[in-house]
Image: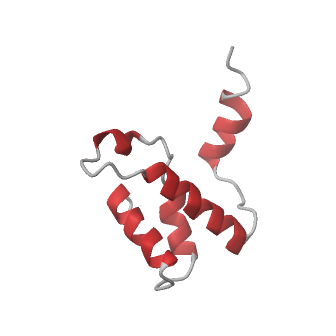
Amino acid sequence: MDSPRGRLLLIKAVAEEKIPVSDRFALHMERCLVCRACETVCPSGVKFGRAMEAARAVMRRVRGKPNGHFVQRVLLKWIIPHTN
């Protein structure tokens, strides 16, 4: 489930209300950096980034504000603000 295809299956299952927005679902979604590198090599041209953005919006709405993960904190608070 930690591949683009696996995440898409999870997103589809949530959209079809087959599975809930659970901690396990959130774990698989949060492990993705949403770098969109998979979009450039996708033979089907799936817009994976859009799907992930929508999934994370649903997670925020259902689960509330995330606690924040180490990678996100480092990127948002230290690396990005200090670029010239």
Return the residue nearer the eye: 13 or 1: 13
The vertical placement of 80 against 73, above or below, is above
Quarter holding the C terminus? top right
Residue 69: image location, x then y, percent: 64, 52
Instruction: Examine the image and state in which quarter residue 73 appears.
Output: top right
Return the residue nearer the eye: 10 or 1: 10
Return the residue nearer the eye: 14 or 30: 14
Point 57% across, 60% down: residue: 54
Point 39% across, 39% down: residue: 37
Point 38% across, 60% down: residue: 2
Q: Residue furthest left?
A: 43
Q: Is residue 42 left or right of residue 71?
A: left
The vertical placement of 20 against 79, above or below, is below
Quarter holding the N terminus? bottom left
Residue 49: image location, x then y, percent: 48, 49
Q: Is residue 1 visible?
A: no
Point 67% across, 19% down: residue: 83
Q: Is residue 4 visible?
A: yes
Residue 77: image location, x then y, percent: 73, 36
